Image (tube, helix red, strand yellow):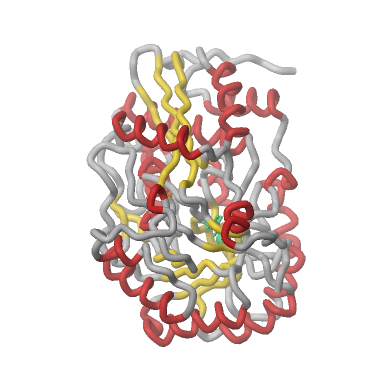
Amino acid sequence: MTHTISGKGPRIRSINITPIAIQDPPLLNAAGLHAPYALRTILELETEDGVTGISEIPGNEATNQALEEASKLIIGKDVYQLNQIQRELEAYFGKDSSVDRGDAPWDQRKLVHVFSSLEVACLDCIGKLVNRPVVDLLGGRMRDAVPFAAYLFFKYEGAGGSWGFSKDPAARGWDATRQEAAMDPEGIVDQAIVMCQEFGFHSIKLKGGAFEPELEVACMQALYQEFGKSAPLRFDPNAIWKPETALKFGKEMEPILEYLEDPVRGQENMAWLRGQIKTPLATNMCTTSFDEIPSSIQMGSEDIILSDHHFWGGLKASMELARICSVFGRDLSMHSNSHLGISLAAMVHLGAALPKLRYALDTHYPWQSEEIIKGGRFDFENGAVAVPSGPGLGVELDRESLKILHQNYLDCGLKKRDDQKEMQKVQPGWTFQKIRW
Ligand code: GKR
Ligand code: MG
């Protein structure tokens, strides 16, 4: 039997969905090359009494279309009734399946993105209504600032955006370094030194899967030479290695890694490898939804789930995931993709509420140069971001930037992320392979 529950809270009067494109440098990964612009979608929701909430999710034309349809369904709903909103969306769209996630390093499911964007915007509204930060709506803060890790990439020279593969000669410090090519151990170590200096990061992750394992592992060894035990190291080849490759290089990196992220594809391969090496295994590719938790626990496929509120259906779902992880002796940390400050604010509120946070979170934020919130870009102090102090997310949309970044979207012509297509512009004929080495 289905019941319709009519809440008495403020109703949602309008929802605005604005696709934007932000400059992104030519970063390499297992799926190819980042385009000069990364796509994001900004959602603004307003209640009938004029309170507004905002959110940011990865941009994709199909998701935006779904978001438009979802908006029509939830206009008029009580902003507090998130369970009911979720049920209606599931009934309308059907649940995402793990096949919908796709084989790329990032998640391509629709409903989780749609619900995440609506949930975060509603929580932003609710926070403003009750004059509390979002972290308090998630159960309250366990820390005042949330630690992040340096996220290194192999890359071609270039700043992205209208600079493409060329550099802005006026850039200094990290802003100049992030435009340099990094294709070998020396380039990667230089990138790490400047990024850590500028942001104060303590842990370091290298995105692999772009080159032969020998070269990428040599880069990890070079980072260890440079930083020693003072900087916990992670490596993520996005599941492009065969099990035997992962065993060989996993063993080689055992003495230097804090954790190894998605060395192989699928829960079974992860579980097999986990039985062979001492290094903890982390994932944002093999256990990516609640439906996959039972088999993950049964097989023992990872030690750490790298959650992402955009992919797990929001902030509250991520808190639920944290509880499940803790029950089964897993850790929870955070995955990221190219993003701006609204996503960062949501990640920080969630990171501050997590009861246990052993590992510094991922963020692509240093690779971006623009912002969409008033007051400009977030500061990192000693590698951490302080929880914004205002009600809700504690950040406000900068309408001028929204206009500019939306124009970027219209001008750049991109409709979804396709790293293979970008790579083919540099290496004609290049194709993505799920498992390459
Ligand atoms: O930005 O190229 C990238 C990454 O490969 C990203 O898309 C992944 O989703 O950062 C992610 C990861 O940890 O796998
Ligand atoms: Mg990953």
Q: Residue at x 35, y 34 (%)?
A: 404
Quadrant position of the C terminus in the picture: bottom right
In the rendered image, residue 307, in percent from the top left (x then y), is placed at: 54, 52
Q: Is residue 301 visible?
A: yes
In the image, residue 352 sits, relative to residue 241, either above or below, namely above
Q: Quadrant of residue 363?
A: bottom left
Camera-side residue: 404 or 247? 404
Quadrant position of the N terminus in the picture: top right
Left or right for 417, reference 121 = right
Camera-side residue: 106 or 146? 106
In the rendered image, residue 364, in percent from the top left (x then y), is placed at: 43, 56
Q: Is residue 330 visible?
A: no
Q: Residue at x 38, y 67 (%)?
A: 180
Quarter of image, ligand 1: bottom right
Q: Residue at x 44, y 64 (%)?
A: 151
Q: Residue at x 42, y 15 (%)?
A: 10
Left or right for 231, reference 290 = left
In the rendered image, residue 172, in percent from the top left (x then y), is placed at: 24, 63
In the rendered image, residue 237, in percent from the top left (x then y), is placed at: 60, 68
